[in-house]
Each structure stands twice: as C-alpha cells, then as structure tokens.
Image (cartoon, rainbow, N blue to C red):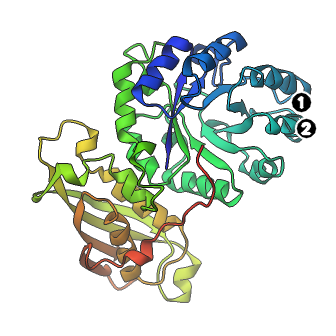
Amino acid sequence: MTWFLASVRDPGEAAIALAGGADIIDCKEPSAGALGAVAPEVVRACVAEIGGARPVSAVLGDLPLEAETLRRAAETIAATGIDYLKFGLFPGGDVEAALAALAPLSAVTKLVAVFFADHRPDLSLLPLLAEHRFAGAMLDTAGKSGGRLLDHMDIARLGRFVAECRRHRLLCGLAGALEPPDIPRLLLLAPDFLGFRGALCGAGGRASAIDLENVRLVRGLIPGSEAGEARAGVDFRLLAARGYAPLEESDPALTDRVHLRDFVLPMTIGVYAHERARPQRVRFAVTAIIARPRRPAAELRDIFSYDVISDTIRMLADAGHIGLVETLAERIAARLLLHPMVMKVEICVEKLETGNGIVGVTMVRTRETASLAIASPARFAGGNP
C-alpha cells in the first residue's frame, strides 16, 4: 500500500489535507527552501488539528549537517508530538556524525532521511540509516523550479532506490515536484509513500494555499487504505491500477488500443557470449487492448497510461541479462496484464544489431495465456507508514 503525503504550512491547510483524504499530514513551509521548517508552535497546532486521525510529520529545515545543530533542532520539533521527523542530507558537513547525533531520537519519533535527486545523492548511506534504526529514506528535489523527480532520475534508477530501501527494511518515499500523471508511473515501484505540495495548490504554485479539489484529485489516483484489499493479500500492482477505471466501472465490450511504437533501449540480451558482453539496441512495439470506462474519458483515472508500458520495459531492461527475446516479451505481457483495465496485449520485441538483419518475436497474450508467474513482483515484508 502506498500512502499519500500532503505537505501543509498551517492548521487550516492540515484540515483541508485531512478532508481531502491524505494519509500523512506533513508540516512544511514551502517558501523557506527545500525542507523549510514550520515554527514548533504551528506544528503543535497542526498535531492538535489532526487529533490523531492521521500520522503527522514535520521537516527539520534546510540545516547543515552539523551534529549539535541538528540534534537541538530535532529535539525541539520531536517534542511537538509528531509521528515522523524528516531531515535533509544536504551536501557538505560530517554526515556520519550528524546521523549518530540524531540516532537516539529514533526511540521518540520515526526519523526519515531525505536525499536530493538533484544533488548527487549518496545512496551508500542507506545501510548506515538502518544501522542507526532510522525509520526510512526519501528522495526529493532541492530545487523545485529545476524539474520533477523523474527529470533527475529515471524509473529504473528510482526502482533501484526503492529496492535498496526494502533490502535494508527502511520505509521508502518519493517526492519532488510530482504531478498527477507521475502517479501511475511511480505506483509501479510500490513506494511506501508519495509526497506532494505543488500539485495540491492552486494557480499560484506551491507557495499558494492547497486546494481541496486538487487534494481529492491526487487522493483519487492513489488507492486508499480503506479498500482493505492489500491487507487481504491482493497484489499491489493490481490494487494500484484500480486508481484508474476500476473493473466495475469498465465495460469489456468497449475497448481502446493504447500503443507504444519504435521504443528503443540498449540492453544485454541473447544466448551468445558476445551478447552478454555488451548491450545492443532492442526495439519494442506494444499495444494494450483495454476495457473502456462506460463514461467518456474525462480524467486520469479513466485512462491507461502509455508511460506504464515504457516504464515497465525500462525496469525489465534494467533488471539484468535476459537470454531470449521470447522471455522478455512474456515478462512484459505478464506485468501489463496485472493491470485490471488491460484485457490483451500485442508485443513485438526486435534485436536490431545481430548482423543478420532485424530479428525478433511478436506475440499476443491475454490474462488466460500470459505466464503471470514470470512477473510476480517481489513483496516487501516491512510495514506501512
């Protein structure tokens, strides 16, 4: 289950975020930097406003990695009664001393370290966070006008970050000028939470007040915990996809064809030794036959995003060497058919550099014929926020 984190600057915005269905209320001053801190008395007022209905987090501010400075600030904010405390791993300073200074607070509040995708994040620190019993790690962007998270890290690299967090049993969050169309792409990675500010605000941007309808839009794209299906063991990807035209609102008799053509990626594929030694260009053409909503498509929940197709291929290409194009095509089909809107897929995978012309395979798969076991996603044994 992925939780929806909404950043708010005061109790009024906290009430709006709660009414709109946010899972975590995050206290943050957007005009004061990447992790602009809210005054302790305001954080305390937000905690009171939420009244235990949702977890509350707060950021520590854009502070240097100086152990004593961080410790004093963290103790002050932790005393407000928050559940999570987020602090930034900014460049410079003694990061190991800073983490050691904060570690004792993990007995009082859950500590989440924030890496910045636009500042060359040192993800080798993840084991140290786990060693100090921090609750989790998050990727964000420091410069909010410098592009979204996905502009700085592609889906494959983000997937590796999520996997490393899971390996060290750290909660994992993703944020950074995220927009609603990013949500189906990032849900493929099954992070523990996705964080939003600008997407929740009005025309004035992230520094303006959050808007209830925008909060509800994001909430509608991230399946909520009230569904209960994840606790029953339903596969996450299938649950996440239900943010987009649930089956009961779709009509299998009405179909659309969503396609991706001439998508070329370098990857290591093939059974010969020389094919393991270097990547070669592989071209993909994929058509997903989807069940249309009964109503005309009017919002993101009504469609199947072609980004899901290209991101699925990117993640499989990043997973390591694959011997056969047939195996790769089967895995793509199996992943896409986990989405409840997808009824059938047509897939063509071609190797472009064999020396014998363009070679490959074309296959058609339905849910009944796909090898779903091939694409069973790894499950994280840890808990949710």
Left or right position of 191 against 225: right
Residue identifier under label 1: 67
**Image mark for residue 97:** 2
Residue 385 visible to the viewer: yes
Q: Is residue 360 above or below residue 311?
A: below
For mark 1, does the 10 Å Cα neighbourhood hold few (<14), some (14 to 19), or many (20 or more) residues? Answer: some
Q: Position of residue 40 (x, y in %)?
A: 72, 14
**Image mark for residue 307:** none
Q: Is residue 277 above or below residue 46?
A: below
Q: Position of residue 308 (x, y in %)?
A: 36, 54
Q: Nearer the viewer, residue 166 or 247?
A: 247
Left or right position of 92 against 354: right
**Quadrant in the picture for residue 173:** top right
**Quadrant in the picture for residue 372:** bottom left
Query: Please, which residue is most extreme toward the left here?
Result: 253
Left or right position of 279 against 288: right
**Quadrant in the picture for residue 45:** top right
Q: Quadrant of the C terminus?
A: top right
Looking at the picture, which amino acid does disc 1 mark?
A: Ala
For mark 2, does the 10 Å Cα neighbourhood hold few (<14), some (14 to 19), or many (20 or more) residues? Answer: some
- At horizontal 27% and vertical 71% (from top left) the residue drawn is 347
